[in-house]
Image (spheres, rainbow, N blue to C red):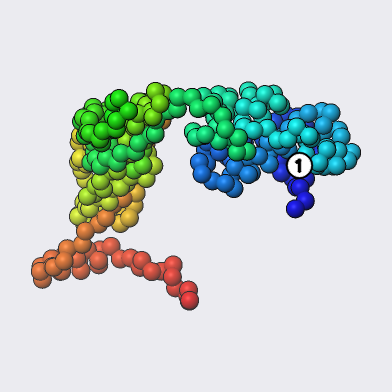
Amino acid sequence: MAKKDYYEVLGVGRGAAEDEIKRVFKKLARKFHPDVNPGDKSAEDRFKEISEAYAVLSDKDKRRKYDAMGHAAFSGGSPWGDRGAPQNVEDILREFGIGDIFGSIFGGAGGGRPGGGRPGGGGFWGAPRPQGPVKGNDVNYSMEIGFNDALRGISTTITVPKIENRGGQTRRTTERIQVKVPPGVSNGSKIRLAGKGEPSPNGGPGGDLFIITKVRPHEYFERKGDNLHLDLPVSLSEALLGTRVEIHTYEGTTKMTIPPCTQAGQTFRLNGKGAPRLKGSGKGDLYVKVQVQIPKHLDEGSQELIREFDRKNPADPRSEMTGVSI
């Protein structure tokens, strides 16, 4: 199969500057690095492909030759020539001087793992390499909390499964851990507890424990981002004459004014009465939608009062619809 054009592999034009080539390669390396895609052969092949393309286009001399002759500029159609392809990520980094890029992406050459690349005995091209201490596996733990607790924040104790390595023996047990849930978490928020995951299989640091929050719905309030929404029932007289109402939120009691002649469905915004912002400062807003409650039954006297009200306040609510057809 014919090799792809190196410019097409990186998705850059032939006149691309060095900075652009480096930036695009950094983005692709982050996406397809085998440490980020363990066990994915297609990602590994893509990583090798973009590494080879970068090896050529980041080298002024090789790029000049490639622009003039294409893949034929290299012995056997490869920029590595007779030496063959590098055997692992460290070789790529040393060969082409791109360790600084990987260091900023993965926390060190080869994806932040001592020895580079994924744990195991083989390099990305199948060659064995030394295995250094590796970090233990991360663990996810789902924790359900109440709606108000998610907004206020809580401290609680959870019991999580734990794996211990003692004298080469693995033992499963449990551990009670104190967890501080910050104000403003929502469904899917992650709380990281460093080193509380699985232990390393060979003396490295332990993995991390990620507490993933699942927030129970509220009977009346709905959360959308950092804003809270409430459907507020009011009586017909309250909507017509206006009133002062109390709203019980996670912070306590908030008072708001319903002005006279408030329409059904009218929405009011209470600034800063929403959910705390998990990232940043301040709070969202509370949106209160008025739901006018109509009595289900009227006695004769009440009906006559309504007729009298209608005579004194004549209105045609459908006047704007006159002449409008479907």
216 up-or-down from 106: above or below: below
* Residue 151 pos. (x, y %): 28, 35
The answer to whether residue 57 is seen in the rendering is: no
* Residue 182 pos. (x, y %): 31, 29
Q: Residue 193, located in which quarter of the rendered image?
A: top left
Q: Nearer the viewer, residue 108 or 79?
A: 79
* Residue 11 pos. (x, y %): 71, 43
Residue visible at 85% across and 42% down?
Answer: 72
Disc 1 residue type (three-letter): Tyr
Q: Nearer the viewer, residue 147 or 257?
A: 147
Q: Residue 69, located in which quarter of the rendered image?
A: top right
The answer to whether residue 222 is seen in the rendering is: yes
Q: Is residue 201 left or right of residue 214?
A: right
The residue carrying pointer 1 sits among few (fewer than 14), some (14 to 19) or many (20 or more) residues within 10 Å by Cα, namely many
39 up-or-down from 83: above or below: below
Residue visible at 22% across and 53% down?
Answer: 233
Q: Is residue 127 left or right of residue 317?
A: right
Residue visible at 83% across and 37% down?
Answer: 74
Q: Secondary structure at mark 1?
A: helix
* Residue 81 pos. (x, y %): 79, 35
Residue at image mark 1: 6
